[in-house]
Image (cartoon, rainbow, N blue to C red):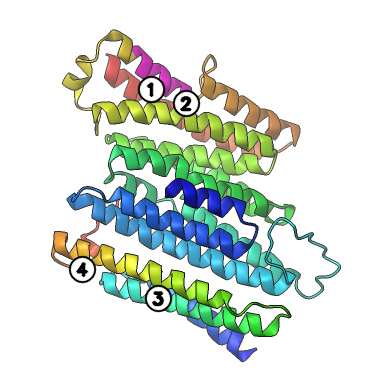
């Protein structure tokens, strides 16, 4: 159902169809993340529900304003001609900003990032995998339709700040789920910033992030670890497992010989080409802090 | 024009009360519902003003708003069954 609603949302050109897909996605994700009668999962589902409902409310409001200003329901077939929009440019820009705001809320980007760690802290690892990878897919694609020069400043701020937040938030964290949540916020910042530079770069980055974080999460899910104080558990794995696990973490951090480096390389190349050095520097500082706490995890495992 | 402004006020006050609600969960569900109703009202005004506006799409909005509300109520009930109270403050926020 989660997959079907994603396809539904992305294949519909009508903005209300997109909204329906988002709603269906939320409904189905909540209903499968509360499978067990766990005390905490209901709470996590409720928090997720409130934030996502508010985000889709923003999206709906923005789409009405879009319709009011453009007279069309179709996001990507509409050619924006500012000469026809005299007096309506403000409404149009407001609609765009409101829709982007709703999507940022749904993604967990900078201003409303705090729900991601608290939700992921209380979910099962499988729901965490879906939340960190698949659930980002629709809002990212929709965000890339809305990207334009008039929202450049907003996007840059959101991307740099969410990268920094993803770095700083995870620094003193002992729970692995929360740590992974902050790392997903940091990667989200990279994706949002890259969106202004190149569309292919975002796809590469998202694909690489999907694969690498899937493997990291699968490791964590397989061994059901929630905090890295459980040293005795790690010892039972054997040497090769530990090495694989550490390599996965380094790949997620983006160290050169691994896959994760390629996506960061593509991103930085695109940013340098378009001359946005501030964005690149901010994102790199966030990624450095990411690397720091990944290294702490790896050291706790292997030493 | 007054209708537009009124419905936008309804929507934004629903959003603000949802964001600032810190005691009862039922209150936040109610404000969510208020937001959806305001959006429906806004849409019906928009579809009257625009040429070629489809009025029946409002029904879809209402239907999905109700779906959302029923999901919220289901979560609410299961939370009351597990926690015993409906206070937002029992949430762990980190």
Q: Main secondary structure of the magenta part?
A: helix
Mark 3 — residue? B33
Q: Chain of mark 3?
A: B
Q: Which mark is residue B86?
A: 4
Q: Nearer the viewer, mark 3 or mark 4?
A: 3
Residue ID at (25%, 55%): A42
For the residue carrying disc 3, how many other residues have a C-alpha within 10 Å: few (<14), some (14-19), or many (20+)?
A: many
- Mark 2 and mark 1: span between their CA atoms? 9 Å
Mark 2 — residue? A253
Q: Quadrant of residue A48?
A: bottom left
Q: Chain of mark 2?
A: A
Circle 3: element type = helix
Residue B15 in sight from this viewpoint = no
In the picture as drawn, the residue positioned furthest to the right comes out as: A83
Circle 4: element type = loop
Q: Nearer the viewer, mark 1 or mark 4?
A: 4
Residue ID at (19%, 15%): A236
**Looking at the picture, how far across and down is residue A215, in whole percent?**
40, 26
């Amino acid at each position: 159902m989660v997959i079907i609603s994603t396809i539904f949302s992305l294949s519909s050109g009508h903005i209300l169809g997109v909204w329906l897909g988002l709603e269906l996605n939320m409904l189905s994700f909540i209903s499968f993340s509360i499978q067990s009668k766990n005390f905490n999962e209901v709470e996590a589902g409720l928090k997720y529900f409130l934030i996502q409902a508010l985000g889709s409310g923003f999206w709906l409001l923005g789409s009405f304003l879009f319709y009011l200003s453009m007279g069309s329901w179709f996001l990507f077939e509409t050619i924006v001609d500012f000469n026809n929009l005299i007096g309506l440019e403000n409404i149009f820009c407001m609609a765009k900003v409101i829709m982007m705001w709703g999507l940022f809320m749904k993604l967990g980007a900078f201003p409303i990032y705090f729900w991601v760690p608290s939700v992921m802290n209380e979910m099962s690892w499988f729901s965490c995998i879906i939340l960190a990878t698949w659930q980002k897919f629709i809002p990212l694609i929709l965000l890339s339709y809305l990207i334009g020069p008039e929202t450049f400043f907003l996007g840059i701020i959101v991307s740099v700040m969410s990268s920094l937040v993803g770095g700083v938030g995870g620094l003193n964290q002992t729970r692995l789920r929360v740590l992974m949540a902050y790392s997903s916020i940091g990667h989200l910042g990279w994706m949002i910033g890259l969106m202004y530079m190149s569309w292919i770069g975002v796809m590469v980055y998202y694909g690489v992030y999907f694969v690498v974080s899937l493997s990291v999460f699968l490791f964590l899910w397989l061994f059901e670890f929630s905090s890295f104080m459980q040293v005795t558990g790690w010892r039972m794995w054997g040497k090769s497992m530990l090495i694989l696990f550490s390599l996965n973490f380094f790949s997620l951090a983006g160290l050169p010989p691994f896959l994760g480096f390629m996506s960061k390389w593509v991103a930085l190349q695109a940013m340098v080409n378009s001359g946005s050095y501030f964005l690149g520097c901010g994102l790199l500082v966030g990624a450095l802090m990411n690397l720091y706490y990944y290294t702490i995890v790896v050291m706790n495992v292997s030493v | 024009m007054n209708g537009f402004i009124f419905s936008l006020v309804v929507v934004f006050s629903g959003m603000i009360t949802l964001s600032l609600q810190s005691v009862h969960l039922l209150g936040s569900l109610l404000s969510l519902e208020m937001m959806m109703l305001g959006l429906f009202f806004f849409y019906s005004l928009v579809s009257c003003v625009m040429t070629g506006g489809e009025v029946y799409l409002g029904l879809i909005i209402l239907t999905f708003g109700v779906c959302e509300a029923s999901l919220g109520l289901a979560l609410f009930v299961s939370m009351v069954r597990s926690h015993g109270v409906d206070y937002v403050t029992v949430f762990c926020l980190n």
